[in-house]
Every structure is written in C-alpha cells, then in structure tokens.
Image (cartoon, grey):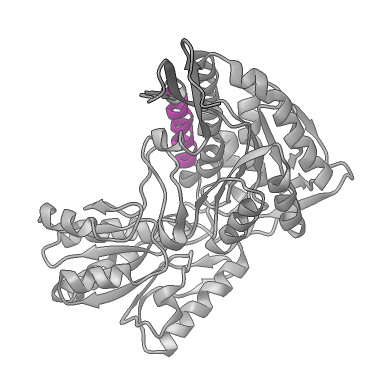
Amino acid sequence: MLDVPLLIGGQSCPARDGRTFERHNPVTGEVVSRVAAATVEDADAAVAAAQAAFPAWAALAPNERRTRLLKAAEQMQARAGEFIAAAGETGAMANWYGFNVHLASNMLREAASMTTQIHGEVIPSDVPGSFAMALRQPCGVVLGIAPWNAPVILATRAIAMPLACGNTVVLKASELSPAVHRLIGQVLQDAGLGDGVVNVISNAPADAAVIVERLIANPAVRRVNFTGSTKVGRIVGELSARHLKPALLELGGKAPLLVLDDADLDAAVEAAAFGAYFNQGQICMSTERLVVDSKVADAFVAKLAAKVATLRAGNPASSESVLGSLVDVSAGERIQLLVDDAVAKGAKLVAGGQVEGSIMQATLLDNVTPAMRLYAEESFGPVAVVLRGDGDEELLRLANDSEFGLSAAIFSRDTSRALALAQRVESGICHINGPTVHDEAQMPFGGVKASGYGSFGGKSAIEQFTQLRWVTLQNGPRHYPI
C-alpha cells in the first residue's frame, strides 16, 4: 500500500485535519493507496507556496529552466517502475503505464526546448519616437486539473508547458490516481526545480467540488487547465469565467474513424482495434464510431470481429490478458446499460458485451441508429459501433453528427481525397490512414465543440500560459493636445 501525502512548498505533509481516503484496486478490491484528503486551507497553502516561488522561478534564465526540466525528464524515465507499481489504482495494464511514462518524459523534454522559444515582437507605431513591443511574460500561478485515465501523460501535460513559460503550478490530483499524480510532483521536486514550484493537492471524492472552486477563486491563480469529462469541464469553465481566469479545456470525445470504399481494410481494422480498445477504450481519443462505406462494410465488420476475438480482457496481472480492467465496477454497469439499450432497439451485437465486475470484454455493435444512446453518448469504455453510409458525403455527415470534436481518422488509398475530407471533419485532430489515438509532445492537441477549446503541446501552448503585454519606449519629445 502506498502512502500519499500532499506536496506543498517542497514538503510532504498530511492534510491539516489528518483526514485520508483510500483508493482500491478495481479488480481485487485491495487498498492500493492511502491518500491525504486536503482541506480548503491546504488548497490555500498550496497556492501560497506557488505564489511565493514564482518570482525566483520566473527570473531564471531560460537555459537554467531547460536544464532542470531535462533532469526531471530523465528522472521520470528512470523511475518508470514506481509509476507502473501504482497501476493498480486504475486497473490498467503495465504496458499502458509504461507508455505513459515514455510520452510524459518526452513532454518534459519538449517543454524544456520551448524555454527559448517564447518570443515577442516589435510593432511599428504611428507615434513619433515611440518604440513599441509586444512581450510574452509568465502569468503567475497555474492550476492544472488532471484525470486518471492517462495519469502520467495528462498530469505532466498540465504542468510542463506552464513551467517552461516561467509559471509555478498547483496540480489537483485525480481521486482515482492520486499516487501517480503525487509521484510526478516528487520527481519534479527531486529534480531540483525548487520548493513550491510544483505543488500537488489530493482530495477526498466528496470534497472535489469545494476544493476546485476554492483553487480557481484564489486571486493568485492566473490560469486554469482541465482535462476530463465535458460535464465537469463545463463547471470548470463557468467557474473560471466567473473569476475572469482564462481556461484551457480538453474534454470528452466520440471519435469517428471513416473507412472509405477504397480503404486498405486490414490497415483500417488494426487501427480501429487499437483505437477502440487500448486501455479499455478509456482514452479521450478512443475510436467510438466506425463510419464505414456500405460497399465494404460487411467485409470490414467481419475482419474486425475476428480481431476483437483475440483481445481478451482480464486481470492485468495475468499473462493471458491483452486488455485490463475498467476503472471501477460502476463503469462496467454504466456501459452495460448503453449496450443493452442499443441491442433492445435493434443493434446487432457482433462481439463481446460480457461484463464481470470491472472486466468488460471488447465489444462491437452493428446497425446502430440515432435512436440508441450509443449513437451520441460517449461510452468511455471498450465499445465501438458501426455506422454505415453510402459515399463520402454521407460518411462525412455521420462523422460530424456529434456534439464532440476531438479526434478523427480517415482510411483511404487516395490520400488527396482523404485530405479534402479531413479539412471538413469537425474535429481538432484528424489522422489519415492512422488511428484516432495518437499524441506527440510537440503537436497542438485540442478539440472543438463539446470537446473543449485551446491547445496543449509545443508552441501552441505558449499562448495559453503567457501574458501578452504591450510595452513602449518613448525616444525624444512627444506632442500632447493639452
């Protein structure tokens, strides 16, 4: 069992009132972590520590910030085993957590490379003798709120570019992966970023709303970023707007994968299976809708069904398991209701559908219609539905018939044809002949519609985590009308 204290001002500490909560392995029920349950006073203390550390961190030369972030990346990679040891919090496979550490380390490296890329500009002025500049400067304290499903990647993403831009951070850990999020803070602390530069707050599930509101309302918090469900994202966005805090929101998705009539079906099947079922479909980019041309739909479904049959879900500790567990039993119950609703209304259950506790087998449904909840609702589980259409325009209509717009994919041997369609798909991300699940540290990552706004990643994040200021220098006398 892992003991998980708060990280405030460089110090490990319990909650002020001593309260804790436990996170249990969803498969075995065993206690994985015992976690400090922060009070609102702890939240205030974390922000105060970040505010106190801000002047020194912001004043560091960019190459010094780079050096410390690179050291953190190396330490994170070296401690991969510690992150994998905490995978029991979510029931994920070890390979998923290993990939998380790999990509998160690269996010720190990419952020390190950005410390010298925060540029301003000189702007011509109509005022004689006025030298006008637009400068990008650190904002202050940034609040990052990260989810559990890709815990190392998404929590690191919440803080890496804010740090590179000269801000200090408070990370509000997920109640479902608190040990992993706390370990990220410890890695950064041990890398020598400085006391208070990174602070980590964990809270009991029942206290989440109060803690988040307190953090956002704190005057020292200047920027907010949130990754999670659209439902909670709306709340975070509203709270941030109420306190006039810019927010970066990366929310839910229901990614379509379009299979055109000339697609390489074998390649499309491999990408669809990976995109729909990796990490039990608990990824914001997961392929939930397979939008297939009717000319090739029967062949595609048959090939995919054969692939799905090889994807056995089970206890992550078993060598026979290809897929692991859902985050908890209630997730399985929720997803089962969606599948039952679709089948009751005429959908064909092609593969899977079995749920035992938190273990759900990879599930594929055909003949899904708008009358079924699975047509529109995000399952956030190992479920993909087939939507059939005649011709590219109908496939495009089906792909865009969603409130979400995060990731998408198109399979076609005619790349010009696919690129023309990609420009009309309503999503922040679109991959041609690749899976909907894909991320690289340097790429702009964000969605449209109910999938949020703003972009993480590389240079695109600089705009999110710096303040653009207009500064002038007057050379010589200036004329005034009075």
Q: Main secondary structure of the magenta part?
A: helix
On the image, which quarter does residue 424 sit in?
Answer: bottom left
**The one of 471 and 453 positioned closer to us in this rendering:** 471
Residue drawn at x 54%, y 29% is 76
**The one of 216 and 295 positioned closer to us in this rendering:** 216
Residue 451, percent from left and from top: 45, 59
Outermost bottom residue:
345
Residue drawn at x 10%, y 56% is 414
Query: Residue 39, can we see it?
Result: no
Which segment did they paint magenta?
98-113
Query: Residue 97, can we see it?
Result: yes
On the image, which quarter does residue 128 sit in?
Answer: top left
Residue 18 is covered by the magenta coloring: no
Residue drawn at x 30%, y 74% is 386
Tell me if residue 100 comes above or below residue 165 in the rendering: below
Tell me if residue 50 comes above or below residue 272 in the rendering: above
Residue drawn at x 37%, y 35% is 442
